[in-house]
Image (spheres, rainbow, N blue to C red):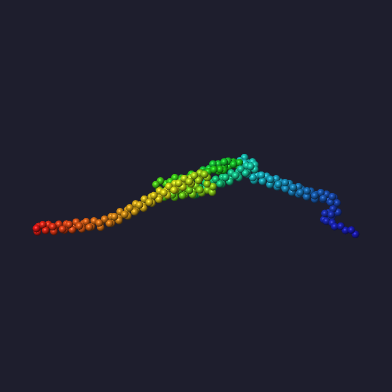
Amino acid sequence: MAMASISTSSLTAWANPSVASHSPRVEQAPKDSAVNKDTASTDASSTSEENSSETAGPKRADGTPMAPEEIQQLEQLKQTDREVRQHEMAHQVAGGAYTGGASYDYEVGPDGKRYAVAGEVPIDYGPVPNDPQATIEKMQTVIAAAMAPADPSPKDHQVAAQARQYLLEAKLDAAMQRSEMEQARSAGATEVKDDEAAPDSESPATNSSTAMASATPDASAEQQAA
């Protein structure tokens, strides 16, 4: 005796043959639609990802994507801009009141923006008139400011060399001033000693004069007696 396993769909087919003849097509349609929808969704996602990857990259000033060489140029400009600004900032921080505001030379990148490619900071490195000690302190600050960046430029080395020359001259002037002050102080001390010793040297003369004065009446008396 043969036996067969049946499912709910088989029972429906035996009970209503007309429904059973159409049921396979009715059930298949939603499956095909779902597959088509999944495929369309996958294609849309792929297209969206491709579009987003294109729009995420750097763009030119007109909004179009950059070529690889333009992207490389842009990255180089950004790096140069950072280095130039850090260089000038180092001068300003170390120089303090002796430095002014930074000025830059710019280059326009493929994205239409300006990037600093060179810069400078004015610095006062002249000596302080008639004040060697102030000049020494100033030149020490100037030298530190000129050599503050990690990569000093030839102009930076030139300013530092001139400041060192002024520093040497100021040290010599300061040494001469100290020497002159010490000599003046020594001369003043000698004069004070001489002034203190002067009354002692005059006292014998005064005593001798007194003795002569006292001796004169005696002589007169002798003459009268004679």
Would you say residue 99 is visible in this rendering? no
**Is residue 173 positioned above or below 197 on the image?**
above
Residue visible at 51% across and 49% down in the picture:
148
Residue farthest bottom in this picture? 1
- Judging depth in this view, the residue of 74 and 162 nearest the camera is 162
Q: Is residue 169 left or right of residue 11?
A: left
| Depicted 60 relative to depicted 226: above or below | above
Q: Quadrant of the C terminus?
A: bottom left
Residue 109 visible, this orientation: yes
User: Could you say where residue 43 lies in the image, as x and y percent from the top left?
Assistant: 72, 46
Q: Is residue 22 left or right of residue 43?
A: right
Query: Among all residues in the image, which is located at the extreme right?
Result: 1
State the quadrant of the N terminus. Answer: bottom right
Residue 225 left/right relative to 131: left
Residue 148 in the figure: left or right of residue 37: left
Among all residues in the image, which is located at the extreme front? 226
Residue furthest to the top: 62
Which residue is at the front of the view, 199 or 122? 199
Counting from the top left corner in percent of width and height, residue 69 is at 63, 42
Tell how many labels.
Answer: 0
Q: Position of residue 200 (x, y in %)?
A: 25, 57
Instruction: Return the x and y of residue 213 as percentages of the image width and height.
Output: 16, 57
Residue occupying the point 38% across, 51% down: 178
The residue that appears at 30% across and 56% down in the rendered structure is 193
